[in-house]
Image (tube, coloured by chain):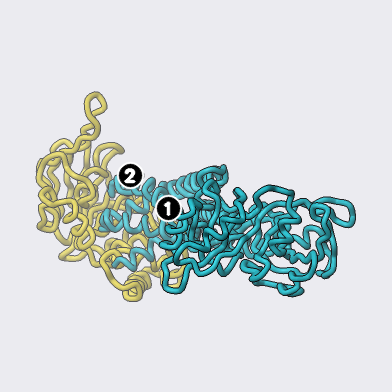
Chain colours: A cyan, B yellow
Amino acid sequence: MLATMMWIAWKMLVGNQVKYLGIVFGVVFAAVLIAQQASIFCGLMARTVSQIRDVEGPGIWVMDPNVQYVDDIKPMSDTELFRVKGVPGVAWAVPFYKGLGRARLPEGSYEQMIILGLDDATFVGAPGGIVLGSVADLRKPDAVIMDDAGYERIWPGEPFRLGRTFEMNDRRAVLVGITKARRTFQSFPIIYTRYSQAVAFAPRERKVMSFVLADAEPGASTDEVCRRIRERTGLQAYSRQAFIEKTIVYYLEKSGIPINFGITVLLGFFVGTAIAGQTFYLFTVENIRQYGALKAMGTSNWMILVMVLGQGLHVGIVGYGIGVGLAAVFGWFVKDATRLAFFMPWQVLAVTAAAVLVIVLVASLLSIRKVLVVEPAIVFRG
Amino acid sequence: MAVRLRGVTKDFGSGTALTRALRGVDFEVPYGELVMLVGPSGCGKTTLVSIVAGTLEPGAGEVQVLGHDLVRMSACQKVTFRRDNVGFVFQAFNLLPTLTAVENAAVPLLIAGWSRRRALEAAADVLAPMSMGDRLTNLPSELSGGEQQRVAIARALVHQPRLLVCDEPTSALDAENGRITMELIQQVAVHPDRAVVVVTHDARVYPFADRIASMQDGHIDSVVSGPFPVGFNP
């Protein structure tokens, strides 16, 4: 009986194409806006930690006690490296430089760049997605590797070519490689070089070491080693994942990004609810005599409730599918764009599904009351 | 007796807006008869037939329909009672506009839990003798008023109800379709273990009645037994 009554409910719903499309449009609008904006938000959040993710190998990041996130550089003395190395459970530790520098290009223009200085001996943290050249070439004098998006930003439309030169802090830099790197929040070009070279590229400061990258000995707990580093050196030490979380939490709490995207997502939610709710309500009012006839003929209020909820669920599933589909297509089209962040994890799909469920429930509930209170005797009134 | 009402009252509103729709109505419909309820607008016909059909609660009085005491029935029991025992033909047809003719006719069977295939086959079997065999897959908007009313009658009869309640079944139809509709109701609905109650203003259909009950100001004024000649005025 449930299946046949749901079939009647479905026929009632899709038979009125204008109203049906109106209700679906409301849900699609909300789903697209929520999924797309939430994905851009996630993309931006992912970009804030892209440099932590790109540094593969070390399980532990050590930094000044006042550092709040990955871009908040508080240089440390080089001696801190040796203190970290001396902590029991630390297998190895290397220095890591991260900073901003201004490059003077041959054409005379200037470009701000992110400088990443890798340990001279080990190249820990070297990029993994080399497109052209070799990481080993970083041993050459003045050598730098640049990310592909940075290259295209500086020399748009030109094919990748090694050997290009530019100046950093009055020193010559020679391009020996091009790599793929995750887009950063600041979206500046990234150059990888040796630690000793990076220090020379950077403006002169008394302390220069940004981070110590380390790893725990085999069998030792990373969290336990981090705790020991904190205890013995007074520095902050986090596992890679914990540092990612710390950075994201910083941006969530201290930046206006969540509130800005949150407002758009809420707007999509409310507008979607209003459109879907109003159209669904009008659809129900238009069919009130039909519902009355069904009740007169022996359909229970419970079954009517299930029918209306089923109609809402149908609209929700169709609207959700089209909405997240459109958002995903949008993301697919912009996936190669360097400026627009777009990352659609399953959590975005789940949040959008939950929002759509609330929308269709609200839309259904507005109508359900109307349908449930209608007396079957309404059918006898002309 | 298929329907027996004693001292039935029904009020709408309260205070100065109080309307006394029924003022102690006694009404009977024997099995195997077609009884018409006639009277001016606002006399209580629709209220009375709604109570007989179990779609409206009486204010007071006894309501016995097909041996069931509707006053003592719970709302849920009434839903089941209507589903199993009552067929409806409405003035405005009240067909579901997005269902085809045969699907509309099958609705009571679908409500009763029949499978869709069986219900549609049974509905087609009822519609075919009504000259609707070639209109089964048409939507109501593609049917004439007379055809829509035939679908409504098929829907009212498809589940073999023992009480058929018709509210102004011919008022939206021309004379010819009105006559065809009443002939259909008389042929297929009037049965020894079945009763038909028809609310009407249409004097052209009086000859189809076995009895005519006239209502006036919320009570039954008179009950006259047929046969009724053309042009009869109670």
The disc label shown at residue B137, or none: none
> Could you tell me which quadrant the C terminus of chain A lies in?
top left
B224 is higher (above) or lower (below) than A137: above
Q: Is residue A69 left or right of residue B86?
A: right
> Could you tell me which quadrant the N terminus of chain A lies in?
bottom left
| x and y, in percent, of residue A105 in the image | 85, 56
Please tell me how many numbered marks the rendered image carries: 2
Q: Quadrant of residue B210?
A: bottom left
State whether residue A25 appears in this view.
no
State whether residue A328 appears in this view.
yes
Question: Considering depth in this image, is A380 or B73 the residue closer to the camera?
Answer: B73
Q: For the residue labelled by badge 1, is the local secondary structure a helix, a strand or a loop? A: helix
Task: Read off the chain for label 1.
Answer: A
**Mark 2 Cα within 10 Å, few/some/many (few <14, many 20+)?**
few
Q: Is residue B126 left or right of residue A150?
A: left
Question: Considering depth in this image, is A120 or B98 the residue closer to the camera?
Answer: A120
Instruction: Give the mark nearest the N terminus, 2 or 1.
Output: 1
Q: Identity of the amino acid at label 2?
A: Arg
The disc label shown at residue A381, or none: 2
B28 is higher (above) or lower (below) than A317: above
* Residue marked by disc 1: A360
Q: Identity of the amino acid at label 1?
A: Val
| x and y, in percent, of residue B187 in the image | 27, 65
Spatial separation of the CA atoms under disc 2 and disc 1: 31 Å
- Residue at the spot 85% in from the left edge and 65% down from the top edge: A164
Q: Are marks 2 and 1 on the same chain?
A: yes
